Image (cartoon, helix red, strand yellow):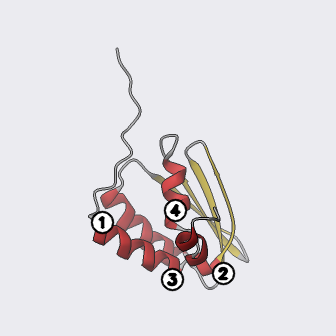
Amino acid sequence: MDQTAPEIFCSLSSVELRDRKADVRESLTPHLIASSYARGVSHLAFARPEVSRVHLEHLIKLEQACCPFFHFEIREMDTEVMLSISGPEGSEDFVRDLFASQRSASCGCCG
């Protein structure tokens, strides 16, 4: 039996993807205080109260519609809210790009 990994494919058009990235980079990335990316798993910590569970649940709803290979988990703490995103190996690159700062997204020299 051939067991293949889920395909990493976003169903957004290039314009929709550009708009999604711009929205995330404007509304969430400025409040990203820590991140790690490895082998299909991304952990993102956001400052509270600037980012709430409601903000992240909205993003999850949008992302589940276009990227069904992702699985999400939210954990709330006193000063931060954590978003864990898992998917097939390599999907962490999609997440890193989605949350890239404007500087690193535009210059290509930073990661």
**Precedes in sequence: disc 1 or disc 4:** 1
Secondary structure of residue under mark 3: helix
Q: Which mark is residue 97?
A: 4
Q: Nearer the viewer, residue 18 or 91?
A: 18
- Mark 1–mark 4 Cα distance, whole angstroms, equals 14 Å
The disc labelled 3 sits on which kind of residue?
A: Glu
- Mark 3–mark 4 Cα distance, whole angstroms, equals 14 Å
Q: Which residue is mark 3?
A: 26
Above or below, 39 against 35 in this view is above
Give coordinates of residue 58: x percent, y percent: 42, 73
Secondary structure of residue under mark 2: loop
Badge 4: residue crowd in 10 Å (few <14, some 14–19, many ≥20): some
Quadrant of the rendering where the N terminus is positioned:
top left
The disc labelled 1 sits on which kind of residue?
A: Ser
Q: Residue at x 73, y 76 (%)?
A: 78
Above or below, 89 against 71 in this view is above
Hey, which residue is sitting farthest bottom in the picture?
50
Q: Residue at x 36, y 76 (%)?
A: 19
Above or below, 101 against 92 in this view is below
Quadrant of the rendering where the C terminus is positioned:
bottom right
Q: Nearer the viewer, mark 2 or mark 1?
A: 1
Give coordinates of residue 94: x percent, y percent: 48, 56
Give coordinates of residue 52: x percent, y percent: 56, 78
**Precedes in sequence: disc 4 or disc 2:** 2
**Precedes in sequence: disc 2 or disc 1:** 1
Q: Which residue is mark 2?
A: 48
**Precedes in sequence: disc 1 or disc 3:** 1
Label 3–label 4 contact, CB within 8 A: no
Q: Which residue is mark 1?
A: 14
